[in-house]
Image: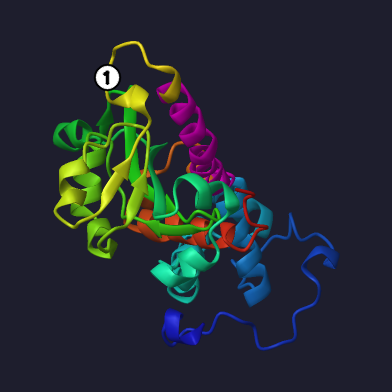
Amino acid sequence: MLYWKGTKQTQTEQPQEDFFNRPGVYNRPGPSKKLSLEQEFFLVMLRLRMGLIVQDLAFRFQISCGLVSQIFTTWVKLLCKEYKFLVLWPSKPDIRQSLPESFKRYYPKTRAIIDCTEVYMETPSSLDTQAMCWSDYKHHCTLKFLVAISPTGLITYISKAYGGRASDKFIVEDSGFLDLIEPYDQIMEDRGFKIRDSLANLQATLTIPPSCRTALQMRKDDVTSTSRIANVRIYVEQAINRIKWYRILSGELELTLLPLCDDIITICAAFCNLLDPLTV
């Protein structure tokens, strides 16, 4: 932690006793005190997982709001650097080797299932920024990012965050996701990303339900295909829900956290990959 905090030491010289057993920890008067590394990590996880605000954490740990923000910023940068490897794009042989039976029969070339999701953010004061972040779908200012999962349900790609105004197609093409695609890959989605031509240029294909291609009444085979894709695609929605278990992403993201939003999203996705895999 000294590397991330510079020359200032974060841990007191005396051994730290258990945080919860110290008498009067919530109302101890006096100057702001420093926390042990364990306490700092606990503070950061409360902010991520429970979405507690800075003032609440400052009161709980009896430290200043400025120190809470400093601790959170330092740890978020550290955790992202150390754990982003958990969001890994698997090789094609690895995907084929672990392909679930539900994919082997109907979608054997599937490389990833993709979707975009949005998180609410506080409304910026700048009108230009408001326009960039306004989401017609959510009727609110949002941040939007692309999520890809493997056929086994592992989160394999998280894009940087974009303003809610950005289209799904723009995010896919601008984020670098297409750089990961190889010839004959099959990408699955059902929200009308309109990236079929972009994938075709890479000799890859897009799998979407027939219901997204036409407004006409579907044939029996199309209904079956739509149902089959929907049953498989539900796992990307479950993966996104897992990311939003971290309540810092389920409420309004504070404007002060915008410089950290990409790191925060990456950390939440990485920690989700430590959970039991989704059953596909």
Measured as percent of width and height from the top left, residue 172 is found at 25, 48
Q: What residue is disc 1 on?
A: 214
Type of secondary structure dominating the magenta stretch: helix
Q: Tag 1: residue type?
A: Thr
The region drawn magenta spans 222-247
- Horizontal arrangement in the rendering, residue 119 relative to residue 79 (left or right): left
User: Mark 1, residues whose alpha carbon is within 10 Å: few (<14), some, or many (≥20)?
Assistant: few
Q: Residue at x 74, y 55 (%)?
A: 26
User: Is residue 63 at least partly visible in the picture?
Assistant: no
- Horizontal arrangement in the rendering, residue 21 relative to residue 54 (left or right): right
Residue 220 lies in what quarter of the image? top left
Q: Residue at x 22, y 34 (%)?
A: 165
Q: Residue at x 61, y 82 (%)?
A: 11
Residue 61 lies in what quarter of the image? bottom right
Q: Nearer the viewer, residue 111 or 273?
A: 111
Is 225 a magenta residue? Answer: yes
Q: Nearer the viewer, residue 248 or 13?
A: 248
Q: Secondary structure at mark 1?
A: loop
